[in-house]
Image: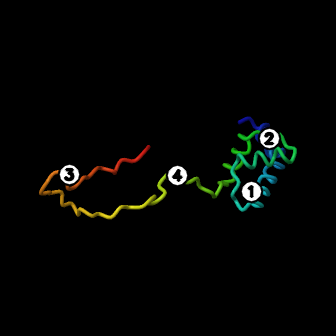
Amino acid sequence: MPRSSFYYSETHPKQDKYKEERELFQQIYHANKGRYGYRRITLEFRNRGFSTNHKVIQKLMHEEHIVCKVRQHKYNSYKGQIGKVAPNLLQRDFSTTKSNEKWVTDVSWTAH
């Protein structure tokens, strides 16, 4: 590194380009108890009159180690037991002495 560049960098410290945005997104994040991710913070920025790209906010959040605390849940379609269960009258005794004495069918099919 040239000597002049070193001393220039010492006397002219680097300015934070996004200082105002950094403070604002931390306020928004903490005001919402850490539940806002970069998308909702971007919308809040737009509502407050800033035209900051979502990628910039994502980058600033990454630099500050700030992550949305709410996790998405996986979809589960199970709704428990639906309908009435018929009583088991046969108790797996399918033997008969004459025809048409016991009629059975398989009702375990479910619609997808």
Measure how far apart labels 1 and 4 are at the Cα level: 25 Å
Viewer-side residue, 11 vs 20: 20
For marks 1 and 2 on the same chain, the one whose residue lies earlier in the sequence: 1
Tell me the SS state at disc 4. loop
Measure how far apart labels 3 and 1 are at the Cα level: 72 Å
Tell me the SS state at disc 2. loop
As drawn, the label of residue 39 is none
As drawn, the label of residue 29 is 1
Measure how far apart labels 2 and 3 are at the Cα level: 78 Å
Measure how far apart labels 1 and 2 are at the Cα level: 16 Å
Q: Residue 89, percent across and down?
A: 27, 64
Q: Nearer the viewer, mark 3 or mark 4?
A: 3
Neighbours of disc 2 within 10 Å: few (<14), some (14-19), many (20+) = some
Question: As displayed, is residue 86 above or below residue 12?
Answer: below
Residue marked by disc 4: 74
Viewer-side residue, 58 vs 95: 95
Measure how far apart labels 3 and 4 are at the Cα level: 49 Å
Q: Nearer the viewer, mark 4 or mark 2?
A: 4
Neighbours of disc 4 within 10 Å: few (<14), some (14-19), many (20+) = few
Tell me the SS state at disc 1. helix
Residue 81: quadrant of the picture: bottom left
Q: Nearer the viewer, mark 3 or mark 1?
A: 3
Q: Nearer the viewer, mark 2 or mark 3?
A: 3
Residue at screen point 66% across, 49% down: 62
Mark 4: which amino acid? Lys
Mark 3: which amino acid? Asn
Residue marked by disc 3: 100
Mark 1: which amino acid? Tyr
Quarter of the image that includes the C terminus = top left
Mark 2: which amino acid? Thr
